[in-house]
Amino acid sequence: MATVNDVVIKIATVNGTGSASANGLLMKSIFRMGVPVVGKNYFPSNIQGLPTWYEIRVTGDGYHARSHRVDLMIAMNAQTYARDLAEVAPGGWLLYDSTWPRSRLLDRDDVTVLGIPLSKMCNESFDGARARILMKNIAYVGAVAALLDLNLDTITELLAETFASKSHLIESNMKAIRLGYDYAMENFVCPLPAKVEQLDRTKGHIIIDGNTAAGLGCMYAGATVGAWYPITPSTSLMDSFRSFCQQYRVDEATGKRTYCIIQAEDELAAIGMVLGAGWNGARSFTPTSGPGISLMSEFLGYAYYAELPAVVFNVQRTGPSTGMPTRTQQADILSCAFASHGDTKHVLLFPSNPGECFTMAQQAFDLTERLQTPVMVLSDLDIGMNDWMVPDFEFDESQIPDRGKVLSAEDLENMEQFYRYLDVDGDGIPYRTLPGTHPKGAYFTRGSGHTRHGEYTEDGEEYQDVVDRLLVKWETARTIVPAPEILYSKFNKAAILSVGSSDGACKEALDRLNAQEISLNYCRVRAFPFADSVKEFIDQHEVVYVIEQNRDAQLRTLLMLDSEADPAKLQSLLHYNGMPLNAGFVVRRILEERSRGQAA
Amino acid sequence: MSYISKPKVAHPGLPKNKLGLTARDYEGAVSTLCAGCGHDSVTAAIVQAVFELNIEPHMLAKVSGIGCSSKTPAYFGSEAHGFNSVHGRMPSVTTGASAANRTLTYIGMSGDGDSLSIGVGQFVHAIRRNLNMCYIIENNGVYGLTKGQFSASADIGTKPKKGLPNQQEPIDPVSTALSLGATYIARSFSGDKEQLVPLIQGALLHDGFALVDVISPCVTFNDHEGSTKSYAHTRQFYHHVVDADYIPPAEEITTQYDKGSAIPVELHDGSKIVLRKIDNEYDPTSRAAAFKYLRDRFNAGEIITGLLYIDDSRKEMHDLMGNIETPLSEYPLEKLHPGQDELKKILSRYR
């Protein structure tokens, strides 16, 4: 298998042995050679000891999904030799630490096993147990550099940047790189037929995960109150927000903080804090995951009915219940759309990569303040915690944030009387006031039945008047949420419809199907309620393959409910084993569906 | 939670505060609680306390959970914003509201069901953060709206209207708050306005978490013989231990106190609270001593009231975090991000 810039490297290690920085170094050195990469972390719900994998897909074509194939396995974990060997594609390679030879365990006719005595070399060259373990990781990077023909100068440059303030570490790391590199050059045929060559396809791009991007987006959006309860895989979102705030949110005059992050006692409290802060006029948010949404549901219904802003990031993981906390899924679509009892529905945004996490974080605050209702951003573990290559983020300073319909003291002074829930403009969105503005602006925020004037009621007509007006607001939301991404190929009657992190694999599948003369149109929904163009898109086609990462076809259900799309047209292709979607799955399933359709 | 708003006709002779407002201006809608409910007396005490403190009505924020007590924010401060939240979650809403705007005065209205059962976690953690608020528990030992079940504050042996006496240990908000490090802890009785008003005033002005546990009898479900939260039982067994006198800013202490019995505490606006010890044995500045005293008297069946503990040395939530004085909600958005050029620098970390 002779390839250039099309190789998948998978590194099998033990959780807690510090391989993350080595893997990052390896990936960035390829990125700096101008070659697009995709980094996926498959890690256990564990602190130390269980097997963990990091997968680097080198993709000269610039695809974003994982590949189902593994060409080069770096098997650093004896516990998983058998399954790691089995996963290598025919014709591929497996590199392992031959300090302890395992010729019988690692025996496959169609895989080339490369042994390198990493532990032995590192024990001889470095002192201290921790250093030896860490340097063993760096040494395999050196070996891979030789095998794939990576640029050693780039690696040196990266190490120099990483350890700018600790120059002795540059030296020891370079020594480890050379150990691996030189051994590979002397003992293996380098480079392998699958290798990396300098390209020019990463300029103007960064490698970042979605949680970091969302935290940065919140900082840029002017969020000031963040309340949260730690939960995998959302935790790093608040870590990101905090670290950006520590750098950029210090008031110049006083040296005091212009942000308030509160680690709540649980998710019920976290959302309560977000609502209290939003009620008071601050841009506030909480990051969480599925179980947190379950706990927040009562308050989310309150916010829908009392019409309060709140931004909730749901970095989805595999359910139901505790499920698999370190695996990905898109299985909270329905629970978020209808979180809480009674007639409740929520605005959802669906980012498909870290770039959209950055922009949608900002859009979410504008929308929640405009619509006076919670906005949930449905990211997932794949987007949130994996390393994506995306175009540089842009921030338009000239764009004025939308703070929605908030009355000032002057507005109130000039008003006869303020009523909280009147539909003055006919768009279903009432005017609100912030506490502390003016005595005339005072009103009683309540989750109990209320009239358009904000008074308590148990009268059927008065109650219905308000909940019907909320539907008017819902239709306004439909017109201002992010529009779907729609791609037309040639004239045809079949299409793919997907959402969020399924996007990368779907687009790659479109290319592969196109190569087989199967052209499909494509629609990726970016928000709920669905824009009218989503329904129009479905109407134009005879069959729409709805691709999503859950068992119960939740997106398809939502399409049927909200857009009144013809269910007969919507064919589900479901992927829900917790691993990120790959293009091979989409292609295979579509071909199966087509042959079944033709047979019928 | 009333259909009826009170007509705002003030008697011309009514006294006015420094803002030119009368006590009527601090009232709310007509109460829909049962006639004789202790909570209505607490509402009246709040009206008087806030009126006398010259708090601008719109700078007061009223937050509550669910239950009879949580309805009361509708009955005072008609020109103050109210947030009647969900059951047991008043503390988190107040925490977020305070995070956004620390310049408002927060009064949280809760009950024994709302704070000691469903919301005990949030009650505890608001104390832990030393959230700057006045937290009032209208404590009657029963659930009223669901018709008379015992709450977590019901005493051992107290009798319900129907059924068997309670056998489970009560959760006492005062000793709970004391063990958690609350910085202002008071207990009073809805029928003792003279004691209650200054305790609420001190709580409103205290910089940090201030608890006022008010025994507030439920006339419908828990005011019978054999109940330990009835008017009659409370009147018979309650004792003032440390009362508080509120002295407005720039006013001299004129009362003659017995030697060693008065502890003046300066509040952030220049006003003072003078702790007036009725029992000279009691030390309201020592957590350990206060705890022992309270437990001993509790075991003897007494209801100890007054300003039972104060610590004005600890920082409240915002100061612990080092937050700016300006309300975060008023900080201009354009000053909250470093701009496009800085974004480019940030992105260079990710190449």
Image (tube, coloured by chain):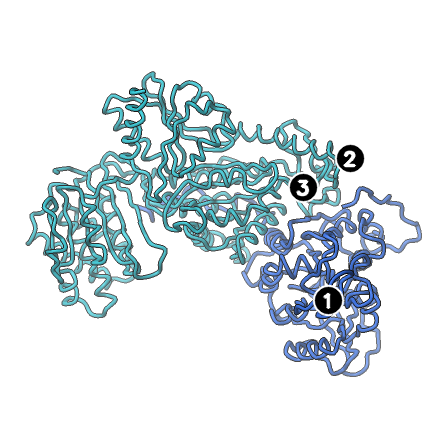
Chain colours: A cyan, B blue
Quadrant location of the N terminus of chain A in the rendered image = top left
The residue identified by callout 3 is A433
Mark 3 Cα shell of 10 Å, populated few (<14), some (14-19), many (≥20): many
Which mark lies nearer to you, 2 or 1?
A: 1
**Distance in Å between CA atoms under marks 3 and 1:** 49 Å
Q: Position of residue A265 (x, y in %)?
A: 54, 58
* Marker disc for residue A235: none
- Are tags 2 and 1 found on a single chain? no
Q: What residue does disc 1 label?
A: B165
Q: Looking at the rendering, which quadrant does residue A378 occupy?
A: top left
Q: Residue at x 38, y 22 (%)?
A: A543
Residue at image mark 2 = A416
Q: Which of label 3 and label 1 is nearer to you?
A: 1
* Label 2 element class: loop
Q: Which residue ends up furthest to the front in the rendered image?
A: B163
* Amino acid type, mark 2: Glu
| Chain to which mark 2 belongs | A
Q: Which one is nearer the viewer's eye here, A521 or A439?
A: A521
Residue lying at 36% horizontally and 55% vertically, measured from the top left: A45
Name the amino acid type tagged 3: Thr
Place residue A174 in its image quadrant: bottom left
In the rendered picture of this protein, how many numbered marks are placed on residues? 3
Chain of the residue on which disc 1 is drawn: B
* Residue A82 picture location, percent across and down: 19, 52
In the image, taking residue A214 as reference, residue A44 lies left or right, namely left
Relative to A432, is A232 above or below? Answer: below
Mark 1 crowdedness (10 Å alpha carbons): few <14, some 14-19, many ≥20: some
